[in-house]
Each structure stands twice: as C-alpha cells, then as structure tokens.
Amino acid sequence: MKVSIIQSIKRLLFGKISIGTTSTMRRALWLFGLSIFVSTSGYMLIEGYDFIDALYMTVITISTVGFTEVEPLSDAGRLFTSILILLNIGIFAYALYAFTDYVIEGDIFKKMQIRVMKNRIAKLEDHIIICGYGKYGEEIVDNFTKAKTPFVIIDIAEERIEYFREHHKDAFYVQGDASQDEVLLQAGIERAKTLIAALPDDTDNVFTVLTTRELNPNINIISRASNPKTQKKLKLAGANHTIMPEQIGGFYMSALVTKPGAVEFFSFVTSEYESDIGFEEVRFDDVPLACQCRTIAELQIREKTGCNVIGYKSPNSHYMINPPSDTSLLHGSSFIVLGNDRQLKRLEKHWETIAAQISKES
C-alpha cells in the first residue's frame, strides 16, 4: 500500500499522534495560546513591560516580522526571545501539519458531506435500508436503482462506501456498524419501510435484526443467512424473512436439470431485459375503501386490465395458487398479479375507476 508524504511526515515527527483529527487541531490551538500566554508573561517579568508592550513583543517575535523591540532587551530578555523563537518554530510546524493534513486528508470535507447526507436522509420516508455493500448488497442496490426505489446503504468499511459513492453519485449512505443504534437512527430506521441485513457474517446479521426490531417494531426485516442453524435465530431475533442465497442457487441449478423449461420460462418472465412481463402485489391497504373485502370477480381485474391473479396470500400468510373468482381481498391479505407493462399500468389506474363504479352500484 502506498503511503502519502503527509502520512510519512506524520509518523516521522509525531509517532502515534493522529494528525487531521479535531482533537489534534484543538491541541495545536491550545499550544499556540499557551505560547502567547507564557511569552507575554515572560516579557512582563523579565523586562518589566506592561501588558500591551509584552503582547506586542510576543506577536512580532512569534510572527518573525522583524520589527524593532519596544525597548532594548537585556541579556536575559535576548536569551528568552531566542528560546521563544525556537519553541514557536516547532509549534508552528505542528499546527501547519495538523491543518494541512486536516484539509488534504479530507476530514473537513468528509464532515461537510456527512452533515449534508444526514439532512438528506432526514427527509426520507418509507425507504429501504440495506446493511452491507458486499456482492449481495451491490446486486440489491443495482435492482433498486433501476426500479427508482429510495434506499440507504450502511457499511462499516470506508473502501466499500467510497466504491459505492463512485458508482452511485446521488445515493444515500451511512458509514458505520449496522448493529449500533446511532447508525441505524442516522439511516432513518424509525421512518423506513424495510431493512435488508446482507452482512457476510450471520452473527452481525442477528445483532442487526435485534437492534432494528427494538428501534422499529413494525418494520419489515429481510435477512441473509449462511448457515441453516442461523435461520431460526434470525426469526427469533425478529426477521420476517430469511434468505439463504446458496440454497436458492443450488435449487435453481438442480431445477434446470429436472424442470428446464419451467425454470427458463420463469427466468424469462423475471428478466427486465428480455421480457416486459412483471409481478405486482395488490395489498388490502393499497386499494380504495370501496374495493376492500371484494372478490376477484367483483373487482374485474382480468376483464378491465388484462392482468391475471395467479396467487392469493391469506391473512395468516398461507398462499393459494390460481385462487377462484370468489376469493375476497380481506384485511391482511393480498393478490399476486401477473401482467405485461401495459396491463400493469392499467391496473394502477383501475382501482379508482372500479371503486367509483362499485360505490355507484351500491
């Protein structure tokens, strides 16, 4: 790894002192103030100057402007001035390196970026929080970006955050440990709709899920799991859904052998590049009041939009494939609808029309 000149000088001159931090800048200011106090006091004691003359001598000596002394200095005064000049060269060098590193290393700009990002995230509502920008997190981000779904990335690694920023200029991010309360709060966990725990370590995912559920009891939590034994722990911690990518990949590959036609058709249907066919979930709360508790036949989804209701999720989370026409959209239930882009757009406009029609007939 290449080491910058600033970092080399820092290690050479200051050892383990961390330059570029707020505490270092504060330390440099304290040293500078202490130098002025000691110098002023010294001139008052040694030369008998009043405060104004002593302060003036201090300033022209430290700044090395070369003005004439207020009065000719005694031997003790000249010795004190020599020591003062040498000491302040070191203090000035320390302050210069601290300020230079603070600016060059980007701390001042990073703090400004963090403040701006906090203000932007504070305006988000019903967004998605993605914990971990690894190989799975990156894939999730790409899909959300294409779908224009608002999201916030959380990752503890600075290099991954920098990579994310390079490829997603206007996206939201928080650098930090996703299992910590303050980091999740900074990402807007109280206002978020869903959290996805895609961290590589199952233990980190469990702690993240626990913290998230405590901060927002109503949020939908989806977590990645690497070990089957962890799935139960994630559920107990509060995850609504657990996903094992390796298990899904293995099933998909085996299905390509046993049911290649079905798998290829499903891949075609779910591919946004090859197909204009998509799925939509119609929830009870998504439709107007007049459409709630109505049957598929009464809602006229197929007749008016061309979409097909291919699944039904009951209030107790049981699924039914190809539900009959007398199936009702009850509280806590939803329809899974299949259609092409044109049909799904018609479906979006359908609810107000059918609600007005039902209300008129009633």
Image: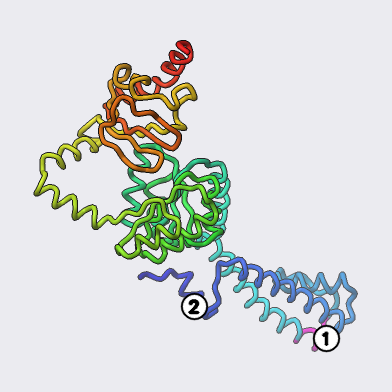
Q: Of helix, strand and loop, which one carries label 2?
A: helix
Residue 238 located left or right of residue 22: left
Q: Residues within 10 Å of mark 1 (few under 14, many from 20)?
A: few
Residue depicted at x 42% and y 32% = 330
Taking 316 as reference, is 98 above or below it? Answer: below
Asked which quadrant contains residue 27, the reply is bottom right
Q: Of helix, strand and loop, which one carries label 1?
A: loop
The main secondary structure of the magenta stretch is: helix
In the displayed orientation, state which residue is furthest to the front.
326
Instruction: Name the quarter where the N terminus is drawn.
Output: bottom left
Magenta region, residue range? 73-79
Taking 122 as reference, is 230 above or below it? Answer: below
Of residue 188 and residue 252, the one placed in the foreground of this image is 252
Give the amino acid at mark 2: Arg
Of residue 357 and residue 72, the one placed in the foreground of this image is 357
**Residue for badge 2:** 11
Q: Is residue 77 magenta?
A: yes
